[in-house]
Image: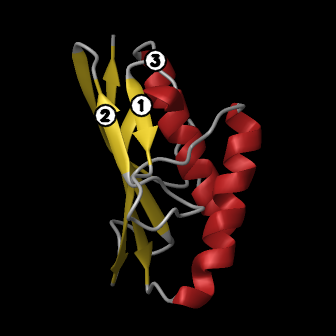
Amino acid sequence: MSVDLIDPAGLLTPQMYRQVAVASGSRTVYLSGQVARDAEGRPVGAGDLAAQVEQAYRNVATALAAVGGTFDDVAKLTVYVVDWSPEKLADLGAGVSRAADAIRGDPIRPTTLLGVAALGEPDLLVEVEAVAVLD
């Protein structure tokens, strides 16, 4: 594995993300933001944040697989959520959990969560960017 995850002593040990990733591979992979669209571009999970999070994470996994990677290789995620509020945390977590089951992996990584006013299309509730490091 080219990415080691660490929650250092002296920092909060979070449940939904990790504090630090140490990457030691030779190829850095930058993924475009992934959204709730299937392979044909059809919307997934209209109005359902958990469903959209799951699909976006699945799409990240698909993009990683195309270059020989998995979520184990992800060093950093950025998650953009439309009209973020703390009340949405349960739905965000549910979507990540369902994605973990679907991809048979651990998508919990160092993550920056940003609330935004809108995304590229009006039906989108979430977008997920990833940076991975592969051997």
- Do residues under tags 1 and 3 come within 8 Å of each other at their CB atoms? yes
Dot 2 crowding, Cα within 10 Å, few <14, some 14–19, many 20+: few
Residue 72 pos. (x, y %): 51, 28
Residue 124 pos. (x, y %): 48, 68
| Amino acid at dot 3 | Met
Vertical placement of residue 111 versus 102, above or below: below
Which residue is at 55% across, 55% downward? Answer: 36
* Residue carrying label 3: 1
> Secondary structure beneath disc 3?
loop
* Residue carrying label 1: 4
| Amino acid at dot 1 | Asp
Quarter occupied by residue 53: bottom right
Quarter occupied by residue 93: bottom right
Q: Is residue 91 visible?
A: yes
Vertical placement of residue 22 versus 116, above or below: above
Q: Which mark is residue 22?
A: 2
Q: Which mark is residue 72?
A: none
Residue 58 left/right relative to 28: right
The number of numbered discs placed on residues in the rendered structure image is 3
Dot 3 crowding, Cα within 10 Å, few <14, some 14–19, many 20+: few
